[in-house]
Image (cartoon, helix red, strand yellow):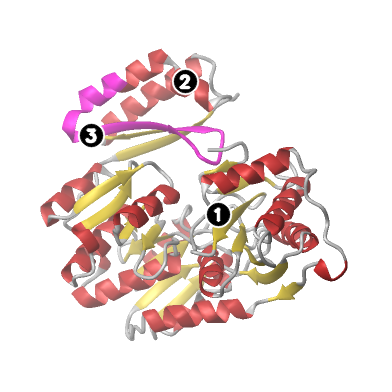
Amino acid sequence: MGRYFGTDGVRGRANKTLNIETVYNIGRFVGYYYGQKEKARIAIGMDTRLSSSMFEFALASAMSSSGADVYLIGYCSTPCLAYTTMNEKFSCGVMISASHNPYYDNGVKIFGNDGLKIKDDIESLIEDYIDNPTTIEYKADDEIGKIIDYKQAIISYQEWLKNLYSLDLSGMKMVVDLCNGSNCYTAKDVLDNTHAQITYINDEPTGININNGCGSTHLESLTASIKAGQYDLGFAFDGDADRVLFVNSDGEVVDGDNIMYLLSKYLKEVGKLNKNTLVTTVMSNIGLFKALDKLGIEYDVTPVGDKHVVDSIVKNGFVIGGEQSGHIIYSNDSYFGDGLKTALLLLEALKHYDCSLKDAVKELRIYPQLLVNEKVKDKKIVLEDEEINNAIKMIGEELGSNGRILVRPSGTEPLIRVMVEAENDELCNKYVYQVIDMIKEKGYAES
C-alpha cells in the first residue's frame, strides 16, 4: 500500500481524512498524466453518498483545467464506470465511492482503459503530486477541457448485460437489496428483463442511507424479507455494486465462497473453466478448498484484495476468481468485479441445474469461522511484535489441518483483522480472542 492508495483506491472520511484539496490534486495530475500524448478523455462515475457530488465537481474542474475532456456519468455502479472506460475508448475512468463503508466516508478509484485498476507506479506518481502539487500548469484558451453530461453510458452498460444473459426466469420469485446505492440506477432495467417476479428493497437513496443497515454487509433486512414471503432466493449488493451476496429460501446467507464453489463447478461442467482453476484469496474458508478438491478443481490462493485476484487471472489465463465478500471476477469479457453480472451468472447456473440455491451448494461444508476487527494505533507495530507472532504460530500448529488462523491489516482502515477457522465455534472464539487480548494488553488498541 502507498501513502494514500490502499487496496481499493484512496479512501477516507469526507472533508476529514479525505478533503477537497487531495481530490482536486488527484484530478489535476490524472488530467495531466493521461493528456501528455493526446487530449485525454476521462469518465467519472459516483455512488449515492452525500459527498460524491462535491468530489465529482472537484475532480471535473481539476481535470478540465489540466486539458482533459470530462464525461460525467453521474450515479452509477463501479462496474458500469469500468465497462464504459474499457469499451468507449476513454483514457481512464474515475469512480467516486467508498464501497461498503458508511456514508460519511468516500474514496477515489481509478481504472485504466483496459478496465483494470491502475498500476502501483501510476499511483505512486499521483501520491508524489499530492505531496508536492506545484509542477503542472493550468491550460488556457481553447486548451481547457470540456465537461460533458454522459448518462447514456448507463444504457450501454445495461444493454451489454442483457445481451450477455438473456435469461427467462419466469416463475422465479426473489428479493433484491439495492443498498440505497449505485445499483438503484443501474440494476433494475437489467433484472426486470429476466421476467422474474422481483421485490426491490432499500432502493431510495438519500445520500446518508447507503450501506446503512442494508446491502451485502448488512443482510438482516434481506433475510427478514425472504422469511416473510415465499421467495426462492434474494441477493444484496454493496454501495458501489461490485459485490453481491445471496440468501437462500430458508433465509441462510450464501457468501462469496459458496458463490465461487457453484460458479466454478458450473463453468467446469459447461467447458468454460479455463485451466480448471479458481482464484481465491487467503480469506476463503478451508471448506471451500476441501470441496474443490473433491470436484477435481485446482485453486490459486492470493493475498486479500481484488487487485491480487485480477493479477492472477490476467497473468495465468484463469477465468474466474473472487473473495469471500462476494467480489467476483469472471473474465470471459472483462476484468472488473461486477455484482450484477455475478448475480446473472449464478441465476444462469441455477437454471442449468434446475434446483434451488440451497441444493446447488449443499456439498460445500463451511467450517465455523470468526473474524474480529480490532482498531489499533499502528498496524505495523502489531504485525511486527514477536510475542504476538509466536502466539499466532502456536495457534496454527494446534489447529493443524482442521483449521487455520490469519492475522492481517485492513487495506482501507486502521484495523487488524484476526480470523480463525476451526471444527467448532468454541475453538474459533478461544483463539481469536487470545490474539485480540494480547493486542489490548500491550496497549496497541485504539482506546
| Residue to which mark 1 is pinned | 99
> Height in image: 241 above or below 382?
below
Frontmost residue, 210 versus 270:
270
- Residue 439 disc label: 2
**Residue 69 at x, y percent in the picture:** 72, 69
Question: In the drawing, does residue 226 fall left or right of residue 88?
Answer: left
Instruction: Give the residue at x 51% y 40%.
Output: 411
The earlier-in-sequence mark between 2 and 3 is: 3
Q: Amino acid at mark 1?
A: Ser
Q: Position of residue 391 (x, y in %)?
A: 33, 18
Q: Earlier in the sequence, mark 2 or mark 1?
A: 1
Q: Earlier in the sequence, mark 1 or mark 3?
A: 1
Task: Give how far apart the Cα atoms at labels 2 and 1 are.
Answer: 28 Å
Type of amino acid under label 2: Ile
Q: Please, is residue 13 above or below residue 408 in the view?
A: below
* Dot 2 alpha-carbon crowd within 10 angstroms: few under 14, some 14 to 19, many 20 or more: many
- Check the image and report above or below for 21 versus 341: above
- Observer-side mark, 2 or 1, equals 1
- Provide the residue span drawn in magenta: 393-417
Mark 3 is on which residue type? Gly
Label 1 environment density (alpha carbons within 10 Å; few <14, some 14–19, many ≥20)? many
The one nearer the camera, 437 or 231, is 437
> In the drawing, does residue 149 fall left or right of residue 284?
right
Furthest-front residue in this view: 37
Q: Are marks 1 and 3 in contact (CB under 8 Å)?
A: no
Residue tagged by mark 3? Answer: 403
Using a 10 Å C-alpha cutoff, classify the residue at mark 3 as few (fewer than 14 neighbours), some (14 to 19) or many (20 or more).
Answer: many
Q: Nearer the viewer, residue 211 or 71?
A: 71
Determine the secondary structure under disc 2. helix
Q: Which residue shows up at 48% across the image and 83% down it?
A: 159
- Which residue is rendered at x = 45% and y = 70% of the image? 176
